[in-house]
Image: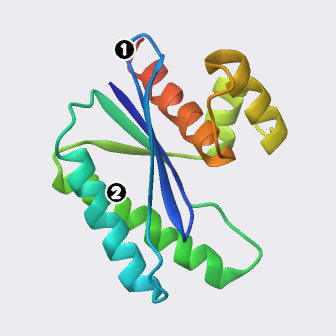
Amino acid sequence: MYMGIDTSTKALHVVLLNEDGSIYSQTKITNKLKDLDARIFQMSDDLYNFASIIKVTASAIEAAIFIQNPMTTIKLSAVVACAKYALHRAGLSIVPVDNRSWKKMIVGNGNAKKTDIMAHAKKVWGDVFTEQDFADSACVAEWSRRQHGS
C-alpha cells in the first residue's frame, strides 16, 4: 500500500493506493481548534493513530510550498514537519516531494494547475474525489508508488 499526503494549515488529506495503483481509501484529518499549534498537534496525533494500524510500503508528503505570505509558509512548514514526525513515530518512512516533481512525473507538467490535476486524476481513478486535495494526495501516492518500482 502507498500513502500520499497533501497538507494545509486546516487539514491533512491522505490517500492510500493498493499495489496496483487503485484507490484503497481517502481520509481527511482535520479539527476545528482555533489555536494553530493545538490544531497541528491534534492532526498529528490523529495521523499517528491512523498510520499505526495500516501496513504501508512507502509514503510521500508534498513538501511545504513557498507562498507570498511568509507567515503562511511558516505555518505550512510546521504542519508538514509534524505530519512527518507522526509517521516516523508510527514506524513509516516518509519522503517529502516537491510539487513540481510529482506534477511532472504524474500529470506530465511540472506547472500543472488544479484543473489539470483533477482532470488527470479523474482519467486515472474516475470521478471519486470530493475535494481537490484528495486528487493531489492520490497523485503524490502514485509518485511514491512509482519511486518504489511499481
Other residues around mark 2 within 10 Å, as few (<14) / some (14–19) / many (≥20) = many
Can you tell which mark lies on residue 19? 1
Name the image quarter holding the C terminus.
top left
- For the residue pair 12 and 97, the one nearer the viewer reads as 12
- For the residue pair 114 and 24, the one nearer the viewer reads as 24
Other residues around mark 1 within 10 Å, as few (<14) / some (14–19) / many (≥20) = some
Choose the circle earlier in sequence order: 2 or 1. Answer: 1
How far across and how far down the image is residue 14, in percent?
45, 44
- Residue at image location 39% in from the left, 65% down from the top: 81
Instruction: Please state which amino acid type lies under the numbered disc 1.
Output: Glu
- Residue at image location 55% in from the left, 78% down from the top: 74
User: Distance from label 2 to label 1 (Cα)?
Assistant: 22 Å
How far across and how far down the image is residue 96, in percent?
46, 48
Note whether 106 is above or below 75 in the view shown: above
- Residue at image location 17% in from the left, 41% down from the top: 53
- Residue at image location 49% in from the left, 87% down from the top: 34
Q: Is 35 on the left or on the right of 68, as rendered? A: left
Q: Are marks 2 and 1 in contact (CB under 8 Å)?
A: no
How far across and how far down the image is residue 91, in percent?
16, 45
How far across and how far down the image is residue 101, in percent?
63, 37
Which label lies toward us, 2 or 1? 1
| Residue 91 visible in image | yes
Residue assigned mark 2:
84
Instruction: Please state which amino acid type lies under the numbered disc 2.
Output: Lys
Note whether 52 is above or below 30 in the view shown: above
- For the residue pair 128 and 45, the one nearer the viewer reads as 128
